Amino acid sequence: MSSRYYLQLQPDGDGRWRAKVYGPRNETLYQRLRAEREELRRKGGASDRLAEIDARLKDYDQINTWLPMTVEWRPGQDQARVEIGGESQTVALGTWSSWYHLRFPWNRWLSTRANARVWVESVDEGQLELYLAPLQIAPEEPVPGSRICWPPDFAAELASRIGDFETLGWACQTHAVKDAELSDAAFVSDIEFTYTWRRKMLEDALASDDWRVLFHFFGSPDRVCHMLMRHIDPLHPQYDPARAEAEFDFFGRKVKARDMEEAIYQKMDEVVGLVLERMRPDDTLLIVSDHGFDSFRREVNLNNWLAQQGYLKIANRSPLGSPLSADQLKSKKNLLRFVDWGGTKAYSIALGKIYLNRVGRERNGQVADEEADALLDEITARLYEMTDPDTGQKIVKKVYRRDEIYSGPYWPDHNPAGDMGAADLTIDFYPGYRASWGVTSGGIDLVDRETEDGELEAAPGPYVKDNMKLWSGDHCGVDIHSVQGIFFASRPLALPEGDDHYDATHVGPTVLALMGLPVPADYDSRPLEPR
């Protein structure tokens, strides 16, 4: 029996397992205990009470609400009986359950509603995998203080017409697949589920006549390309011809893994047809995507590169000057904790961003304002020379200074060094490359090298390697001209004089103009013009 996330399944014998499903945390109690712990630590006393508080904070049963779960299944059976909080369903292997409507009790009088679904799958002979998707706020009974819609009763009214739907901001189980906690089959089934309830939402809105502007979002093509590009792109390092031929059940037909991108766009074409059929004579349909897609084959750790180029120094020495190995720095290799700031001029965090270690901005800044431009020119020139050691291919397509990207009355032109939010350099990679997983959180890949005295010290490892995460497609940080989105309209719309391309900044002013409303003067673009 496999455990996933916070489910700790214990055998009861005779094909039964039990677990606890934890719900909302008692935030009031949690914060009170944390505050008391910090106060005791500040005063430096009461060790017994500190130990008691630490134990309570680690005890989910005291801090969280929870419900009992029971699973009944024996090897060879093609279904499992899953009961949560007294609500029971029989779930066929290789499928998702229906919604569980759960109620997590705080006390005799107060409880919190949540909805959840379970996936069960036989992964090996005699083993069952169970995955409980993240709990969703019940649309008809939201958590007090939560704001999932406007007006406040809109979600409940919608659920009464189309049934329950997900309420978390990120739909589709992408991260569970990325972390190898959920199979491709489960993911594809979840894509079908999400598309279905979002289409129901659209059909419900189209059936009403109380709107003047209707906006609807489908994220399913994005999710499919993020997770399944390894089956679609034969050049991806994870591509396996046999796995690419694997078939999934998708809307009543068999679809191969390599064809899932085409299959989800066929479903989107059906949505376009649905909307066109129901449009009124004076309606205008705009179909807009904010990006295209690319295969994420190779990941680039910019901190490794900066260290190799001499712009970033690793704190690989103890206070006494003895070398520290990569293993000794293992706990400090993320969140820039490995950096020796006194010897560092530049560092990277986030997707393709480089910051200078500037005097007056960073706590231990080393780069004065008068040095910044020359240093940025130097780093930029070297970035354009960066090549993939394995192939010789260029890696960096375009480097932007932040004043090339940002402008306007709220941009701190008067004190560029005083603003930490925008990176000094933003990098667009050639297709196939993206910032590494580690560098997005300020990490580095360390290896050991031998010193002259024969000891081991931490050093930067290779700055390019294969992307072996199942998140195999992306668009962030890729050359913007290689991942263009689409802009379709049901009537001819011409660019304003002087504009040479359509982009997302045209959407807002165009909608306002079509509605006969004034376009604010400070908008970045003017409306598209009917022809």
Image (cartoon, rainbow, N blue to C red):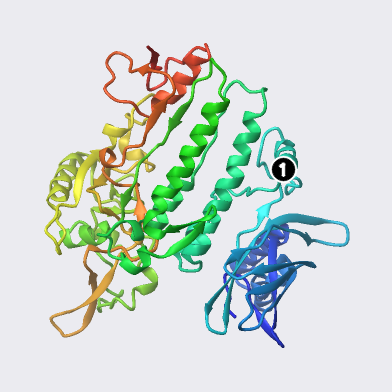
Whole-percent x, y for residue 469 in the image: 37, 64
Task: Please tell me in which quadrant of the rendered image residue 82 appears.
Answer: bottom right
**Disc 1 element:** helix
- Residue that appears at 44% across and 31% down: 287
Q: Is residue 160 left or right of residue 277?
A: right
Q: How far from the left and from the top, in percent, is residue 178? A: 44, 63
| Numbered disc total | 1
Q: Residue furthest bottom?
A: 13
Q: Depth check: give the residue in front, 354 or 138.
A: 138
The residue sitting at the front extreme is 253
User: Which residue is found at the position 25% from the left and 53% from the top?
Assistant: 432
Q: Is residue 483 visible?
A: yes
Type of amino acid at the residue the image marks with label 1: Ala
Is residue 345 depicted above or below 129 in this figure?
A: above
Residue that numbered label 1 is attached to: 159
352 lies left or right of 518: left
> Which sits in the foreground, 373 or 171?
171
**Within-10-Å neighbours for mark 1: few <14, some 14–19, many 20+:** some
